[in-house]
Amino acid sequence: MDPTLIALASAGGTAVVSAMATDGWNTFRSSIVTLWRQFRPDSASEVDRDLETSRSALLAAPDREAEQLRQALQSAWQGRMLTLFLEDRSAAVEFEALLSRLTGAASLKPNLTFHAEARDHGRVYQAGGNQFINER
């Protein structure tokens, strides 16, 4: 199996679930459904319903269950995307371009909250994006 397809499907599943809690959700959902219509038109309506069901479940989940649900949804969407990409490699190419466009949009960037505690001589490094640390 092509590791590139696996990595792309993994990024896709993560992006789908991450977008669920953003203002850009409708644009992202619409783009995913359009992708499905292009490559698997018979299941596009089902994907649309499942995206909305997943989002509703995630937004309604109590805080103590949200992370576990988020991981389960990411796995489910990663699997769906990998199946699509394996059936038609051009779907992977299309999705990669789509993901690049959509994740670059500011509306899809979630609000981040960091919590950390360092003890003794410990250090904490946190970043909402790239982080480069040079220690001598």
Image: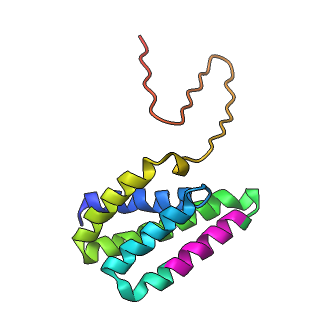
Left or right of residue 106: residue 111: right
- Residue at the far bottom in the pictured view: 42
Say whether residue 61 is visible.
Answer: yes
- Residue at the far top in the pictured view: 136
Q: How is the image coloured?
A: rainbow
State the residue in front, 116 or 46. Answer: 46
| Residue at 69% across, 22% down | 119
- Classify 22 as above or below 32: above
- Region rendered in magenta: 48-59
- Classify 122 as above or below 58: above
Residue 5 percent location from the top left of the image: 29, 62
| Residue at 48% across, 36% down | 129
* Tally of numbered discs: 0
* Residue 51, magenta (yes or no): yes
Q: Quadrant of residue 114?
A: top right
Left or right of residue 43: residue 63: right
Q: Quadrant of residue 80?
A: bottom left
- Classify 13 as above or below 84: above
- Classify 119 as above or below 103: above
Question: Where does the C terminus fall, quadrant-wise?
Answer: top left
State the residue in front, 121 or 53. Answer: 53
* Residue 58, magenta (yes or no): yes
Residue 24 percent location from the top left of the image: 55, 57
Q: Name the magenta segment's main secondary structure.
A: helix
Left or right of residue 11: residue 46: right
| Residue at 40% across, 73% down | 34
Residue 49 percent location from the top left of the image: 55, 80
Say whether residue 74 is visible.
Answer: no
Question: Where does the N terminus fall, quadrant-wise?
Answer: bottom left
State the residue in front, 103 or 73. Answer: 103
| Residue at 47% across, 57% down | 15
